[in-house]
Each structure stands twice: as structure tokens, then as C-alpha cells.
Amino acid sequence: MITSTLLLLALSALPGEDKTVLPPVYALRVARAETIANGTVEHAVVLVENGKITVVGEDLPVERGIPVFDHPDWVVMPGLVSCRSRAGLDGRGGNASNPEVKASSELYPKDASYESLLEAGVTTLGLVPPGEGIPGQAVGVRTQGGTAAEVILKDPAYLYMQVRAETKSKKMIIDGFAAADEHKEKVAKAKEKWEKEQEKSKSKAKPKEDEKKTEEKKGEEKKGDEKSGEEKKEDEKKEEKKDEAKKEGPAFVPPEPDPKVKPFIELREGKLSALIDISKAGEYLHLLDVLGDEKIAYSVACNLRDDIDLYEIAEKFGKTGARIVLTPEITLQPFTRRDRNLPAELVAAGAKLALLPRSDSAASYASWLKDVGNVVRFGLDRAVALRALTLEPAEVLGLADRVGSLEAGKDANLILLDGDPFEPRTKIRMVILEGKNAYEYEAPTKGGDDAQ
């Protein structure tokens, strides 16, 4: 093992640097790891190599020569994932169907707001286009980087739609799938026409090919006596390949869909998922009616407030196994002073849960863990809450193979805390993004407001 002196030398800040410098390969030894995928690991060791997690386990031995970052009182968990956000974006949108629009087109990776998100432990964002109706396609990004290419993880991540209890928003979705049907018919007609043309060209070419083959055969017969048996076999194989290539002919190339139609085609094909925003229970029922027999992958998002009535359709969410994306609020039963823990109620009914901060403000992100902790104190299962901040939103973004849990092979996006994530006094001490130190807490000077 490495001595304390060597540890300090290996992990101390370089001259002129403000942050601890982490080498390409190192181990974290902490009191507890919240792995999300495999529960809580006590006395945990996390080995990181070239930005990836290679192993997580209890009291694992560390190979001699690997620097160890040792904090026996700290907790490590995956970086937080906010799957629906407008942080760092300032575009404006109307109420229309623009499924071809991409949030990545207005991305500015150097926006100052991303620094405050990192301080709050947020390592992955799902950014959506502005507006109502069908604003367009979200992009999954990391929260640090100098260029769009450096920060974009997945583009598109999902199609963002909003359903309201009025005809216009429902018609946008119905029209989108109707346009996909029209394109399907267009492709079928184009293929039928192509097949006829192929048959026609083959029938015209056949007599000439037969005549050519006869002449070639005569020539080959004259040379045949001079060739060995192996050479003859090779010639036969070449001829067979030529015949097969002619039979296959050129591949059919379907006509390109209109950019507005393509997202709906990809929804049906399972190449794209959707995040659908609602504001009350009735709008989810409208959504089910609009989708009808359409089999697409989607999650439902809703900002909670005191007059919300989602409890009325909890069983519907449970039966469909839908993922519901909520803000961490304890709401009041309408017209009463009785508290309702809707996140816990919907989970109990069978829904999957992802959680968002209350807004995109720096203050909302800074209090996100505490707000979720409050919902946990009111009855939401702690393990479900941790998953709702990490792996479930990663699923929404289609990035669960990379982020959202502490597992071998995943990006080393980690939060190091000096206590339980949901305790109000707990501080985030360090945020690691793909193995590198992205943020480190600076202890206040003596006499400061936060001095301990």
C-alpha cells in the first residue's frame, strides 16, 4: 500500500493549481459507495482508470504503486443527471410542431451557469429546445467542456413533446404519425417501381449476356486443356460470384423522409424515444388516447404543485409501467391542508421515477439533494430516490450504458460528499467528471459564515 506521505505527494495540487490533480489511474477509498445498480457498499474502494470505473467493491486490496485517495468518512455516488433542462440556453420558441429542431443548435458549452451545476454535483444534462407543442429534439451533454464536440454525449437524446387538454397539441402528434404513414406508403410505391424497373432491365440484358457467355465459354474451352484442375475450380468460383452479383443487382435506396417526419418514423422504429410533458392528470389520459396502438418508448414529465391531481391516475401509470419525471415536492391535497407525497404514491403504484430540480436556477440545483431528502423524509424510499437522481434520468436520455451508476466500464462521473447525500448539512467535497477533478470544495477561511 502507499504511505500517507506518498499519497499526499501523488494527489496534492500542482504548483500554481487550485485543485487536486488526479492521475490517470487511482483508487478512491471511502466510508460508503452508493452504487445505485448494486446497492450500498460499505468501506468501499473505487478504482478509476483513464476516465472509466474499472472496479467497485468492499475493502478491496489496491495494487502497489496505484495512488489511493483516502477519505474514511466520505460517501461516493454517481454524478447527478438532470434529464430536462434549459440551463445555459436562451432561445425562444412558440407553440408549434417543430420535431426537426435540435437543442444542440443553440448549445454554448462555455456558459457560466454550467460551473454552478458542477458544484451541485450535476455531471449530465438533457437540454431541450424552447417552446410548446413539439419543440424538437433534446441533446445529452456533460457539464464541462470547451466545444460542442467535447460536451455532446448523445444527439438526439429524445423527442420533446407537450400534451395539453386542447385540440391543437393532440393534433400535432396525430399529424406527425399520419405523415409517417404517408412516407411509408411513398417508400412502398418507390420500391414497387424500382422492382419493376429491375425486372425490365434484366429481361433486356439476358439475351446479350447469354450470347457473351457462349463466346466466353468457347474461348475457355480452348484454353481449358492448358489449365490445371485447381485453376479450373478457381475460374468456376469466379463465375459463380459474378452471377450472384448480377442477380443481387443494385440495392434499393428508399426516398429520404421530410425532416419533420423523420423523428416520428424513428419513434416507431425504436431509434428514438420521447419525453412528453403534461400539467395535470387529464392530459395523460389524452396522451393515451392520442397514441392509441402506437408502440413507442416514452417517459412523462410534470412539475408538481399544490393543485395537481396525478394521484387520480396513479394506477394508470402503474399499469403502463411508465417512467414519470417529477420535481421533488410535497404537495397539498386540493382544498385541504393534507400533505401528499406524489413521487412515493406513484412509485407504490408501479411507476418508475426520475426527479428534476424545481427549476433551472442555480439555487434550485444547489438545493436539489436537500429537496429530494425532504421527500425521502416524507416517505419516498431512499434507494428509489437515489436512482431517480441518477440512473432513471440516464435511461430517459439513452445514456444509462455510460452514466448513472457506479459500475465497471462506465464513465467515472462521481460525487464525493462528507455525509449522507440527503442530510441537510452534508457538503459536496469534490465532483469528478470522467476521472478528472471538475470541482473541489474550498473550505472557508476562519471566521467565515460557513466556518466549522
Image (cartoon, grey):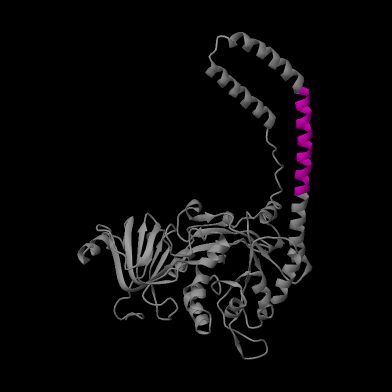
Residue 449 percent coordinates (x, y): 36, 81
Compared with 106, 5 (above or below) is below
Q: How many marks?
A: 0
Residue 270 percent coordinates (x, y): 64, 55
- Residue at the extreme front: 229
The quarter in which the C terminus is drawn is bottom left
Q: Residue 260 or 398: which is nearer the viewer?
A: 398
- Is 191 situated left or right of 4 in this image? right
Give the extent of the magenta segment.
184-204
- Residue at the extreme bottom: 337
Residue 19 seen in the figure: no
Residue 28 seen in the figure: yes
Quadrant in which residue 253 is drawn: top right
Residue 187 percent coordinates (x, y): 75, 44
Q: Is 272 included in the stretch rendered in magenta?
A: no
Quadrant in which residue 287 is drawn: bottom right
Per the picture, the main secondary structure of the magenta-coloured stretch is helix
Q: Residue 347 or 116: which is nearer the viewer?
A: 347
Quadrant in which residue 437 is drawn: bottom left
Compared with 196, 56 (above or below) is below
Residue 152 percent coordinates (x, y): 51, 55
Q: Residue at x 47, y 78 (%)?
A: 370
The quarter in which the N terminus is drawn is bottom left
Q: Is 203 included in the stretch rendered in magenta?
A: yes
- Is 212 situated left or right of 369 in this image? right
Q: Residue at x 31, y 57 (%)?
A: 23
Q: Residue 260 or 419: which is nearer the viewer?
A: 419
